Amino acid sequence: MLCNLCPHTCNVNRPLRPGAPGTLGFCRCYTMPRAARAALHFWEEPVISGTKGSGTVFFSGCTLQCVFCQNSVISTEGKGWEVTAEALRQIYHNLIQQGAHNINLVTPTQYLPTILESLTPALPVPVVYNCGGYETIATLKRLKGKVQIYLPDLKYYSESPARRYSHAPNYFETATKAILEMFRQTGPYEMDDATGLLKKGIIIRHLILPGLIEDSKRIIDWVTQTFRPGDVLFSLMRQYVPCGSVSDSQYPDLNRTLTNAEYEEVEKYLFSTSIEDGFVQEVASADSQFIPAFDGTGILKSTQT
């Protein structure tokens, strides 16, 4: 089957696994999913992580190739272990048994057919689709009814940094159309009054990047102009640290953390708008200690049983 799951529309017949016939596309992923970690995760927004953690499955590869990705060992280098739909169902079951409030699928789009199979029958907890926002409407429509919570990034407003840093042409137009489709599926967000957890809806995430303060403001403008209070949640993130291929010789403009002045300017702008529902981050979030260990936790045990 020719792969056009993401906006890169590579139109190639991806190999099933290493050594099999076929052609790798932009994501450089095989058809059989690979994942690097499945564990309770406590560093998402409070309405996702709660008190017991989000049952998070980190998939290998990504339909974006962000040069600053903090998970580059799996997103770009492809570290991970093969998992079938049956193994994924067992992984979800294990996480729910551990108390997971939800099942959180991180960068799953390149493995959509197996993901869909793994989500049948429906799970007893919400499914979170955690992605970079660079999605096609066709792919999202296949997820309708299987995903209760969308957690998309909205990374860029301007075309130049989207192409330079994430190799994502037409990012803003593509991602905003995708977010509107997500909203059509979920409707306004709903909370569980008893637990304070998100039951359904969208959290739009925006990571402020060094030197791109005006992009951040234009993204806040779009959210303000597009949604009414109570429609979506907005998460302003200051956790950027130089990772991936960022260095003094490559992408030196990104080889620093945000200044306090940069973050405070964007935060002040956010607070001047009608956006009331959402989250901001403390300066301590900009630390590589929050990058998970991609060591097969929760994957190896499940695939070997």
Image (spheres, grey):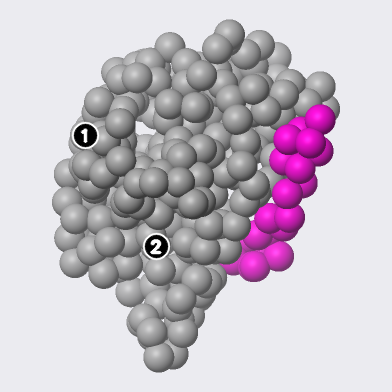
Numbered range of the magenta stretch: 284-305
Q: The N terminus appears in which quarter of the rendering? A: top left
- In which image quadrant can residue 212 be found? bottom left
Q: Residues within 10 Å of mark 2 (few under 14, many from 20)?
A: many
Q: The C terminus appears in which quarter of the rendering? A: top right
Residue at the spot x=61%, y=42% of the render? 82
Residue at the spot x=68%, y=32% of the render? 55
Given the image, on which type of amino acid does mark 1 rest?
Lys
| Residue 57 appears anywhere in the view | yes
Q: Nearer the viewer, residue 122 or 127?
A: 122
Residue 72: where, in percent of width, then height?
A: 52, 63
Given the image, on which type of amino acid does mark 2 rest?
Cys
Q: Is residue 294 magenta?
A: yes
Residue at the spot x=66%, y=11% of the render? 124
Mark 2 vs mark 1, CA separation in Å: 20 Å
Residue 213: where, in percent of width, then height?
A: 31, 66
Residue 193: where, in percent of width, then height?
A: 64, 15
Q: Nearer the viewer, residue 155 or 134?
A: 134
Q: Residues within 10 Å of mark 1 (few under 14, many from 20)?
A: some
User: First in sequence: mark 2 or mark 1?
Assistant: 2
Question: From what the image shows, is residue 235 above or below residue 263?
Answer: above
Q: Is residue 131 magenta?
A: no
Residue 254: where, in percent of width, then height?
A: 40, 77
Residue at the spot x=42%, y=30% of the render? 112
Give the SS element for disc 2. loop
Residue at the spot of label 2:
66
Indicate which disc residue 177 carries.
Answer: 1
- In which image quadrant can residue 83 be found? top right
Left or right: where does residue 123 sit relative to residue 172?
Answer: right
Query: Pointers 2 and 1 in contact (CB under 8 A)?
Result: no
